[in-house]
Image: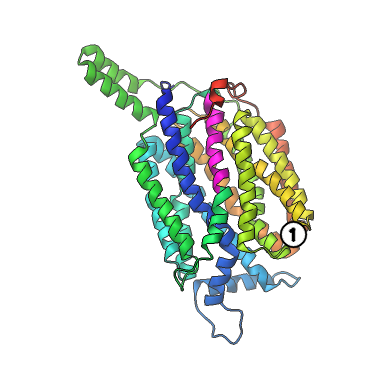
Amino acid sequence: MAAPVDAATRKRVLRVIFVSLLLDLISFTFILPLFPKLLEFYRSVEAPLDASSPPSKTLLSSILGYLNAYKAAFARPIDSRYDIVLLGGALGSLFSLLQAVASPIIGRLSDKYGRRTALLTSMAGNILSVLLWVMAVDFRTFVASRVVGGLSEGNVQLATAIATDISDHNSRGATMALIGACFSIAFTFGPALGAWLSTISSVAANPFATAAGVSLFLILTETVYLYFNLPETLPALTRKTNGAANGTANGTANGKANGTAHPETAPAPVQRTNSHFLLNLVHMTFLLFFSGMEFSLPFMTYDLFGYSSSKNGRLLGYVGLVASLLQGGVTRRLPPLLSVRIGVVSCLVAFVLLGRTNTVGALYAAATCLAATSATVVTGLNALSSFEANEGERGGKLGNLRSWGQLGRGLGPVLFTSVYWWAGREVAYGMGATGIAAVSLLVLFGLKSPPGSVRVKAQAEKKEL
């Protein structure tokens, strides 16, 4: 195992992770409440419903043509307003499927070349992605921005790998909860801020350019901050650096010996409690259903309550606020497995409520359950996976976990919105509830707590920043 990281270094690195991930996720969440109006805008420009308008030959018109052919395969008529629902699901799936391909590669590269190098390379792709969104006056450019973003987004998995590099077993759960808190805080403010920025017109040809421009500013700020403040944390590289420094400083044979001995020390083997296959399977199946429901939520509120982007932003902000309070006060003190179990049961309750709700009060009750799910499940699964990996393979194993999860995220939106589109809300959420019930059984009876993950020392529960 790697030598313990001193408290000052650990605190400094955690601060860098927290600030950078917060900037990244706030930027990322800007677009979430905008999808319905954003896609309506591109359709009005490139594929208007007005029959008197001349037909256009654009990427969007071609896609909508395929959707119309898909609709014709069903016996029941489907209103054209649901085109936006399925198109949004397809775009969400595209981004996540690209992430499923890229995440294991990014993880293995970080194990070989270091976390810092991999993260800065990922940031270059993120900058290009958001820059394309700023310039997206047509649907084709917008799709290109999503493709580049899907292939390059590695911030979350690399932040998780960095957190495990600098944490021991006793502090692992609290550290993972800190990363989860970034998600919660970002979802508290990001969607609402994105919705507000979308009301500010700065480029006539792209009414969402203001939100995209602020997103680009945040990503650039994050990149500069990481470049000047993030040290390398990969144990294999830090041992070499520290060993060489010791050898040079001592200037003796013993010092030189010490300087070369550490890099050759093999990591201690890990006694696995849960197979990575089982953890990956849980992650994929959970996100298959959860992401479909999560992605359909703005469309459901738009359809059921006539919610605008600002109201959807307010709803997502509420979810983020509750989740951040849970992350800071509850989740970081829970053993990872217990955290996952609480989250999947809360998700099941949310599905049942959303399938039956006809009031705003019930909608917010379901949103509270979603907040509990957001605060627990993915954070807990990341912690469990890190307990089952050696220090030299964490990047790859966590990348694989994210890849399986992104596969679920990729399939979930398009499958869920297809059912929603064809059979209605009650059937879609009923199927989702059945799927999450199966996941809950797998989590409750198939997973076990790794040694060292159950009892957390009091010091690990202290404020990290």
Please tell me whether residue 100 is drawn above or below residue 87 in the rendered image. above
Position of residue 382 in the picture relative to residue 348 (left or right): left
Task: Report which residue position mark 1 lands on.
Answer: 425
What type of secondary structure mainly makes up the magenta span? helix
Q: Position of residue 81 (x, y in %)?
A: 66, 71
For label 1, count other residues whose C-alpha is less than 10 Å away and answer few (under 14), some (14-19) or many (20+).
many
Position of residue 158 in the picture relative to residue 359 (left or right): left
The answer to which image quadrant residue 36 occupies is bottom right
Nearest the viewer among 438 and 251 is: 251
The answer to which image quadrant residue 17 occupies is top left
The residue at 59%/40% (across/down) is 378
Q: Position of residue 288 (x, y in %)?
A: 64, 49
Please tell me whether residue 244 is drawn above or below residue 48 in the rendered image. above
Please tell me whether residue 110 is drawn above or below residue 76 in the rendered image. above
Label 1 SS: helix
258 magenta-colored: no
Q: Amino acid at mark 1?
A: Arg
Q: Is residue 414 visible?
A: no
Q: Which residues are magenta?
A: 171-186
